Image (spheres, helix red, strand yellow):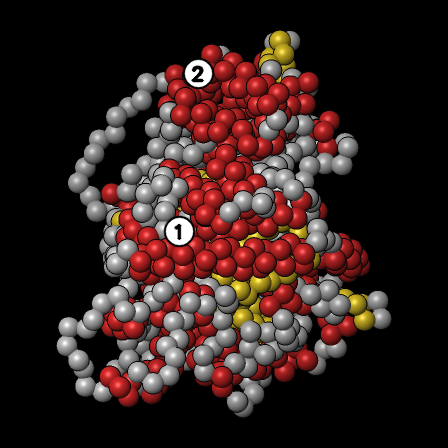
Amino acid sequence: MTLTEVRTFTPPRAFGDAISQPVVTPVITTSTTPRSIPELQITLKPAISPSPKARQNSMASISEEKSKGGVTFAHQDKLPKLPIPELESTCQRYLASLKPLQTHREHAETRRAVQEFLQTDGPELHEKLKKYAEGQTSYIEQFWYDSYLNYDNPVVLNLNPFFLLEDDPTPARNNQVTRAASLIASALEFVRAVRREELPPDTVRGTPLDMYQYSRLFGTARVPTDSGCQIQQDDKTKHIVVMCHGQFYWFDVLDDNSDAIMTEKDIAINLQTIVDDARQTPIQEAAKSALGVLSTENRKVWSGLRDVLTRDPGSNNADCLSIVDSALFVVCLDYTEPTTAAALSQNMLCGTSEIEKGVQIGTCTNRWYDKLQIIVCKNGSAGINFEHTGVDGHTVLRFASDIYTDTILRFARSINGKAPSMWASTSPDPSKRDPESFGDVSTTPHKLEWDMGPELSVAVRFAETRLADLIEQNEFQCLDFHGYGKNFITSMGFSPDAFVQMAFQAAYYGLYGRVECTYEPAMTKMFLHGRTEAIRTVSDDSVNFVQTFWADAPGDAKIDALRKACQAHVNKTRDCAKAQGCDRHLYAMLCLWQRMQDDDAASTTSDNSMNGYSFEDGSIIGSPSQDSVFSQSMESQSVNGGRERGDSINSNISATPSQRGGVPQQLPTIFADAGWDKLNTTILSTSNCGNPSLRHFGFGPVSGEGFGIGYIIKDECISICVSSRHRQTRRFVDTLESYLLEIRRILRIAARNAASAGGANGTGNKGMSRAREIDAAAVHHQNGQEKPARPQIGNRIKSRGRLITGQSSGLGHGGPTSMFNGGSSVGNIKGAGGGSVSSAMEESVVMSEDDEIGGYGFFDAGMLQQALKARQQGHYHHHSHNHDSSSDDRSNQSRQRRSRRDVGKKLPLIDY
């Protein structure tokens, strides 16, 4: 196994020293080196328990980078760094986001807290953050990573999202083995394209996006330690792991050049062999040793269980664990056949829970949540569940879209060899290669045989019962709304994403009579190592809209209010895509303040304390650690039941100040104010992520009182998946559907009235197609308004029958067929400002394009704050590890690769 390079840490200096040190201007040399491919600072060490020190990975540092060619990372060195907004602008946006969520008294208190922050701690923290950012790839990145990796609760239903793929358009390929083999073959070509840097970069309207996350998609695992999780990666790995009935199998699929060494048929034979072997063990028996459920445990518990797995030097478990951790990805073959969209969504997100004679036989035991998973049901329905720390939804969406498209094109090429390909180049046909050219590989599936001692058996049992509880505490409902989609919405002059966001607001208000904190992510990948910024959907305009909609107001007033609210949302989305939001900036300053408190507290106890790490260049990384003063100060709050995901720091923290030389250090007022807690307690967590390759997309609720809403806006339909902890999810979905139908009715009436007015005035319609103009002219003539210029042959015959104008059905679908006497007349509807919205029609394409920069992740600042919740008191002592010499590492890697060929029981292949 080729291990990734280990980053060497140097002893830390005081934080104040690092901040005050003059910045050395780097020497800029001409190079084609992309800034997105640093030497990997995280390491995969099979059979060795991760050390506490290893948790402080340096994924966000700027280090020496590999010289790369190819197109994938060609634009990385040209991408701008994520900008830090002006402090005053951030505070103004913060206040604007909170105003519609607070009472007058609450908002007045928040304003005072913000004003005090601007006059005291704010400017100093802002300047120190700018200083810190000069030595970082991104000012938020390391804080972001730490917030995820410090998260202790189970990742299932809390962190990992899912994608549900559309069925394969060729029905004969929609069975489990064939569909799985097809997806694996396409996934391997994607891996090859990434490793060879042949994957074309993502773009938005011609602007290249950051591609760094693709280098962290495969061979990566989230590994728990006693001081938080770390990300491990083997970037040269060649095998995949297949799970079936909770049992683990593996086989190699790539050679050293990342070329596929198995055809789709070869893969199918291996999968069928695995399915047949797994069936030999009764599922009730297999469930008792389904170690995958351990990955659903609390992270500290899971860390301790990994130590149990690896502590016996004579056990197979360490090698088995290494095989799983280092796999390219995991393929889960389920024996169930969910029939509804809600059941399929649940299966892809958390699996099913089904108890038979006291034993769990659901698919929840057939998962490994610390890695990227491709899940295939018995009927061929397929989806993806992914670990979210290093990648956002946009990255995995590209992966899902490309492999789905490739499966179709590969089938097309079997019919017509000239059919196009997704890839710049493809692997040589394995069936025509000399097997000796594959190198040191094992293509026959091996079954991993774990040594199940009493301690592990009990751990599996308890992990499964807790997982079953977690699954039963959540519910899922899906809405496949086919009334209309993107085409109709844009024909009405609205941004599709803003339109759907207002639907969520209206549905919630109609059900509960109030507005709540809502979150939507905006992608910031136009910047180097960009992730997301938080769009705060609720605004004064959105509140006015929902109140107007549910009031006894005329239709025109409702449309005007909707148009204002949508435009406000579009403006926010554009600002956030430019990294001009408030959440990330404020969160970074909070982390920086905590770093300063920890550093000062450590300096009073020991000049040599290792209360954090610095890199060789002296830059400080990391958000508050688990043993930080800030984390300890939150301990008192966890006594009363802990903190839900999505919650944030509240005003009570200042009551337990940290100590520096005996002087209490109060939390900056903006973070101690109740408004900070309100903004970071998300009730509606939403995300727009998808395209026609996906049927649904979703995630668990962010808080116990909230909804998790994943949605996909397609040309002619809207797919919505809603989750909650049994908070009338079905009723919310029904209310949402009713709103979508009602707003369409209102828009139709307004469009029809505008069309009548336009016809009476003899005005034309800019949105009308030329074909529809002929019919429109005919109606004009029949009404006696105008005589045709010349008689046309066949008019008498063609005039038979009543002309169907399509006012009802056409508008429901938008597009060219809805333009006559309906959708096209939107150009004459009066806008919010009293003027014509023909300009809105002309800008609808631009509005639609704005959706490309929104909704490619789903975690809010509250989720980031969750990582700072209370932990056990006491300091962790970090011990430095002596690194082996590079020559020893290479020899160890060689031995490990040779020994891995013998891990697991080799299966006899079946005829397929």
What residue is at 56 percent from the left and 68 percent from the top? 375
Q: Residue furthest left?
A: 790
**Residue 531 drawn at (x, y percent):** 42, 44
Query: How much space separates mark 2 and mark 1, taking CA atoms?
Result: 42 Å
**Residue 387 drawn at (x, y percent):** 54, 53
Q: Circle 1 is placed at which residue position?
A: 494
Query: Viewed as shown, does residue 259 lie left or right of 664?
Result: left
Point out the tag, 2 or 1, that comes first from the N-terminus. 2
Q: Circle 2 is placed at which residue position?
A: 124
706 or 567, which is in the foreground? 567
**Residue 606 drawn at (x, y percent):** 58, 17
Q: Residue furthest bottom?
A: 911
**Residue 92 drawn at (x, y percent):** 44, 25
What residue is at 70 percent from the left and 51 percent from the top? 727
Question: What is the crowding at mark 2: few (fewer than 14 residues within 10 Å), some, or many (at least 20)?
Answer: few
Q: Is residue 273 visible?
A: yes
Q: Is residue 546 visible?
A: no
Q: Is residue 595 above or below residue 483?
A: above
Question: What is the crowding at mark 1: few (fewer than 14 residues within 10 Å), some, or many (at least 20)?
Answer: many
